[in-house]
Amino acid sequence: MVKTVSPLKPAPELLLLHIELKWITPTIWRRFAVPEKITLGKLHHVIQAVMGWSDSHLHEFEIAGEKYGTPAPGGWGPPVNPEARKTLIKALQGKKTFNYVYDFGDSWHHSIKVEKALPAVACPQLPYCIDGANACPPEDVGGAAGYEEFLEAMANPEHPEHDAMMEWHGEAFDPKAFDCERVNQWFKRIKV
């Protein structure tokens, strides 16, 4: 009797992603790795953690001409394909770039690029943040224009809105702050 040997399954791959918040200077960006078979629903949670958002608003992915997300309660909002079971690698359909919008009121547009595939052993944990720069704007700050006004008020104690912004935010704000290790600690709570 001849024994058949099953072909080895290819090792699962990771995707190294670069995300950038559009229309903000200096650029707010992150580089992080996720499994290629991560669902878009789980990728949303990873993006929330890596960028510093608090998942308080609706979001939407636009990938290869399709829109994915969680349908808005009550049926209002743009129609989207369900994200819960769609994997990133299947949604990409060979494309290397896609978009993510968070908070349709503040309209935080992010561009995401697949920089390269990595072997599964390339990272000590998954997801894994490799690098980044600059703090994420606070939730509900009013989009890019509101963020600019917020930064001006926070930086100048003589600004007429300084005290109100300090009270609203609750603490000083350093727009250059980013802590990769802190993000990786948050990532340990996310199951991918």
Image: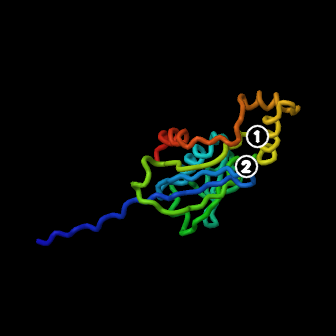
Q: In x, y percent, where is residue 185? A: 50, 38
Q: Which of 150 and 83 is in front in this view?
A: 150
Q: Which residue lies furthest to the left in this view?
A: 1
Q: In x, y percent, where is residue 17? A: 55, 57
- Of labels 2 and 1, the one closer to you: 1
**Residue wearing tag 1:** 141
* Residue type marked 1: Val
- State the residue at coordinates (82%, 36%): 153
Judge whether 172 appears above or below 100 on screen.
Answer: above
In the image, is 147 to the left or to the right of 5? right
Judge whether 49 appears above or below 8 on screen.
Answer: above
- State the residue at coordinates (51%, 42%): 184
Q: Which colour scheme is used?
A: rainbow
Q: Quadrant of residue 13?
A: bottom left
Q: In x, y percent, where is residue 151? A: 78, 40
Q: Nearer the viewer, residue 123 or 108?
A: 123
* Residue type marked 2: Phe
Label 2 residue SS: loop
**Residue wearing tag 2:** 104
In the image, is 141 to the left or to the right of 127? right
Separation (CA) of disc 2 from disc 1: 13 Å
- State the residue at coordinates (79%, 35%): 154
In the image, is 102 to the left or to the right of 85? right
Q: In x, y percent, where is residue 115? A: 55, 62
Query: How many numbered dots are placed on residues in this image?
Result: 2
